[in-house]
Amino acid sequence: MMISPLTTGIYTGLGVAACAGLAAGAYAYASRWPGSRVFGGALTAPARPGELALTFDDGPNPAWTPRLLDILAERDTRATFFLLGSRVIAELELVRRIAAAGHTVGNHSWSHPDLTRTPTSLVREEIERTNDTLQQIIGAPVKLFRPPFGARRPEVFRIANELGLTPVLWNAMTSDWSEPSAERIAKRLTKKITRLNRRGQAANIVLHDGGHHDAAANREPSVKAAEMLLERFTKSHRFVTVDAWC
Ligand SMILES: [Zn+2]
């Protein structure tokens, strides 16, 4: 599908107030959420130990994202999807399905480069092009940006802020993309979640429903692990989307 250039930039600026406290600087964020972990102006998780955010990176993946959406729907749970701009054009319906189900759509760059090694003008293009494309597909402003590999430098965050985006990192991750056992992924993440809770922190959990090298990567272990975490924590915790922490 062609995306009309006439609508490009329609939402530019609308997201600016999304995470106003954070956009104003890491200090404002830190003082708003005492005990929160701040890495140079990025959001990880607030001091709300009962809350969990499931976040999924590198999609959309036509092979596994639909199954994941079914699992989330069965449990009436909302998650946050950090999508790659270069993948969404081929998966318009899937992206619309993610948004229509009430999940939060975030920006994970266009082509998944290491932004610490990318010239500034290309950093802006990677982020802005993805934002414009996502916003045209879902018809709503995109407010969150997760840098690929979590690679960050002040220039990247400055550009994200200028585009009305809050940079988001995480505090619970395991190498789910290379781990064949869903049980092991879920076990490791459960350990991290429990530890964060003991320290008084919410958990910002990363799993991968896509692969930045392979558009249809096999993500069965990650998707199953998500299901196990839902099973394990639904009664004791509250699953939120990352923008609930803005
Ligand atoms: Zn990624």
Image (tube, grey):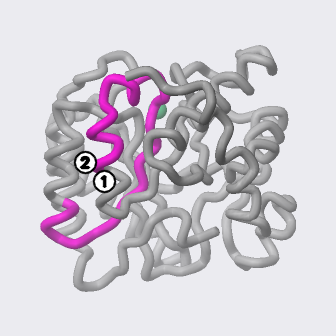
Q: What residue type is labelled 2?
A: Ile
Q: Which x, y percent locates residue 213?
A: 37, 16
The quarter in which the N terminus is drawn is: top left
- The quadrant holding residue 219 is top left
Q: Which x, y percent locates residue 163?
A: 75, 43
Q: Name the residue under label 2.
A: 185
Graded by Cα atoms within 10 Å as few (under 14), some (14 to 19) or many (20 or more), the crowding at tag 2 reads many
- The quadrant holding residue 45 is bottom right
Q: Name the residue under label 1.
A: 188
Q: Do labels 2 and 1 touch, CB within 8 Å? A: yes
The secondary structure type at the circle numbered 2 is helix
Residue 96 vertical placement versus 32 (above, below): above
Marks 2 and 1, how far apart at CA: 5 Å
- Side of 196 where 9 appears, left or right: right
Tell whether position 8 is magenta: no
Q: Which of the pair 186/95 is nearer the observer?
A: 95
Q: Which x, y percent locates residue 61?
A: 27, 32
Residue shown at 32% from the left, 23% from the top:
90
Residue shown at 71% from the left, 77% from the top:
33
- Side of 225 where 160 appears, left or right: right
Question: What stretch of residues is rendered in magenta?
Answer: 72-97
User: Is residue 39 in sight in this rendering?
Assistant: no
- The quadrant holding residue 12 is top right
Q: What residue type is labelled 1?
A: Arg
- By secondary structure, the bulk of the magenta-drawn segment is best described as helix
The secondary structure type at the circle numbered 1 is helix
The quarter in which the C terminus is drawn is: bottom right
Tell whether position 90 is magenta: yes
